[in-house]
């Protein structure tokens, strides 16, 4: 199997998924930061469905609705693979299910800013 130096690890969840009364997407981002992952972005979808859900859609008058959410983590492939292995037991607890993918990427520029 060919390995690539960098990858993007993607998690497809719901905004309402929780483990131990904590939002799952927030837990993943905090754990990624603790493990030294280069970056994370959480995207909230306006519409979508999964294997175990009906079509979910955002309505402007609903503030606490169930919507699709995707988390992207970008870093060295080996680091992402290790991170996934560590959090897989947490993901297996998600009652409604989730989807996780990893894809090789070519990073053209990774410029750090001033904090």
Image (spheres, rainbow, N blue to C red):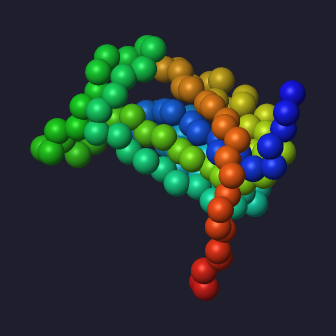
Residue 110 visible? The answer is yes
Residue drawn where x is 43% and y is 48% of the image: 43
Residue 91, position as x, y percentages in the image: 64, 30
| Residue 85 found in image quarter | top right
In the image shown, does 43 or 64 lie closer to the viewer? 43
Residue 41, position as x, y percentages in the image: 52, 54
Answer with left or right where residue 53 lies relative to residue 107: left
- Looking at the rendered image, the quarter that the N terminus falls into is top right
Residue 87 visible? The answer is no
Residue 13, position as x, y percentages in the image: 49, 33
Position of 67 relative to 106 (above/below): above
**Residue lying at the far left of the rendered structure:** 61
Marks counted in the figure total: 0
Residue drawn where x is 56% and y is 26% of the image: 99
Residue drawn where x is 76% and y is 55% of the image: 35
Residue 69, position as x, y percentages in the image: 43, 39
**Residue lying at the far top of the rendered structure:** 52
């Amino acid at each position: 199997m060919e390995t690539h130096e960098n990858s993007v690890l993607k998690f497809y969840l719901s905004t309402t998924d929780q483990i131990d009364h904590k939002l799952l997407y927030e837990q993943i981002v905090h754990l990624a930061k603790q493990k030294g992952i280069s970056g994370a972005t959480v995207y909230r979808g306006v519409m979508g469905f999964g294997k175990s859900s009906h079509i979910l859609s955002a309505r402007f008058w609903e503030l606490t609705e169930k919507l699709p959410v995707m988390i992207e983590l970008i870093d060295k492939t080996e680091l992402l693979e290790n991170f996934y292995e560590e959090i897989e037991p947490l993901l297996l607890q998600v009652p409604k299910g989730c989807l996780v993918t990893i894809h090789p990427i070519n990073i053209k520029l990774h410029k750090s800013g001033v904090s």
